[in-house]
Image (cartoon, grey):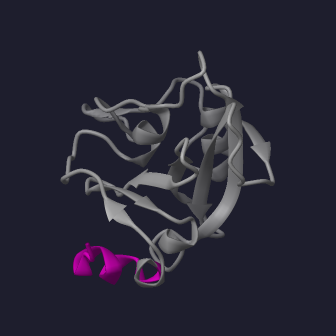
Amino acid sequence: MRDPELEGDFPGLMDSAYEPKSPKDPAYNCIAFALGDLKNFWEDIRLNGYYWPPGIPDDTMAGWVELFSIHGYLETDDDALETDFERIAIYGNAERPEHVARQKGSGVWVSKLGIGKDIEHTLAGLEGELYGRVLKIMKRRCQEGRRVLE
């Protein structure tokens, strides 16, 4: 099912397969979703309703890499599916990271779009002006043989 609003924000979706998987939900964002936390909005803002781990640098690429590193992720150059590993892809531009997606066991990528929908997509489908491009891929061994939220 095509979604003109999503395609307006992410023109790359017009040329790739994608599927909305949830309604809009402001309770969590892409970082939380990538880590399996559907109760917190992870953002480096010191206000009620936001969460950022103590000791993690601010909202920079180094900060995001460290944040995922403390959750067991290591940097890799490969975005291919591996049965025993789960991957994340960090999108951004020269100034900062903008978004993170995670790979499902099927090999499809899935994201929480800000306070919007969760969607399944290709990595290229979200690249563009809003989120930039994929700058980092990280992976970790599946925990107890399971992937986040699967």
Residue shown at the point (32%, 32%) measured from the top left:
40
Give the mark count.
0
Residue shown at the point (55%, 41%) measured from the top left:
105
- From the image, which quarter does the C terminus lie in? top left
Residue shown at the point (45%, 73%) measured from the top left:
130
Camera-nearest residue between 137 and 61: 137
Q: Position of residue 75 (x, y in %)?
A: 77, 43
* Residue furthest right in the image: 77
32 in relation to 114, above or below: above
Q: In this image, 85 relative to 108: left or right?
A: right
Camera-nearest residue between 32 and 18: 18
Q: Position of residue 84 (x, y in %)?
A: 69, 31
* Residue furthest top in the image: 144
Work out whether residue 96 can be spotted. no
- From the image, which quarter does the N terminus lie in? bottom left
48 in relation to 6, above or below: above
Camera-nearest residue between 66 and 105: 105
Q: Position of residue 141 (x, y in %)?
A: 69, 27
Residue shown at the point (52%, 44%) measured from the top left:
104
Work out whether residue 81 can be spotted. yes
Camera-nearest residue between 22 and 31: 22
Q: In this image, 143 relative to 128: left or right?
A: right
Q: Quadrant of residue 85?
A: top right
Q: Position of residue 20 (x, y in %)?
A: 29, 60
Instruction: Give the magenta range.
Output: 1-12
- Please, what is the dominant secondary structure of the magenta stretch? helix
